[in-house]
Image: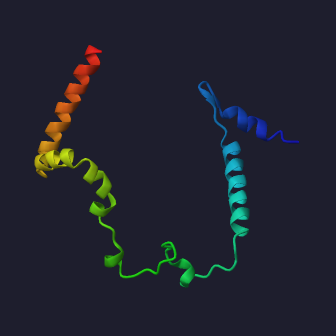
Amino acid sequence: MLEWIEPLIKTLTTDSGFWNPLVWGIVFIISYLVIYIVRGMGKKEYKKDTGQTQVFLSGNPEYDKEKMHVPGANVYWGFTEALKWLYNKFDKMHTGNVSDYILWFVLIMGLFLVIMVVI
């Protein structure tokens, strides 16, 4: 019944494995159908450009984006406060020059490689 498939499959057998684009095509089609069916089961009440598309902020209304922005200093306040002694030392070393960061990277990688060779 499916004699026309056998010559096609034989041409797709290689020394390093078996590649069958027919199987991949069937898997792709079945996956697409499953996704389409699952998507079709979604709620029909969704309406674009309404309150449903607003960001959920724990029930708080969204204000001006400038007022809503939380700076990184606030987010990491506990971290920087707990390690203030170390943070201040690193802050003094911060120059903003990329070549300084590359130098530190090369030095630390060299130290790491020396430790790895010794161990």
Residue closest to the far right: 1
Position of residue 114 measured from the top left corner of the image (x, y, whole percent): 22, 20
Q: Is residue 78 above or below residue 66?
A: above
Q: Residue at x 19, y 46 (%)?
A: 85
Query: Which quadrant holds the N terminus?
Result: top right
Identify whether 25 is placed above or below 3.
Answer: below
119, above or below 23, in the image: above
Residue at 12% over, 44% down: 99
Q: Position of residue 71 (x, y in %)?
A: 29, 66
Display colour scheme: rainbow
User: Residue 100's quadrant in the figure?
Assistant: top left
What is the residue that sits farthest to the bottom in this orientation? 50
Q: Looking at the image, which residue is at 11% across and 48% down?
A: 92
Marks counted in the figure total 0
41 vs 64, left or right, is right
Nearest to the observer: residue 58 or residue 40: 58
Quadrant in the rendering for residue 39: bottom right
Look at 72% across and 53% down and name the residue there: 30
Q: Quadrant of the C terminus?
A: top left
Name the one closer to the observer, 66 or 106.
66
Please say if 24 is above or below 49. Answer: above
Image spot of residue 42 (x, y percent): 70, 70
Q: Is residue 93 left or right of residue 108?
A: left
In the image, farthest residue toward the top? 118
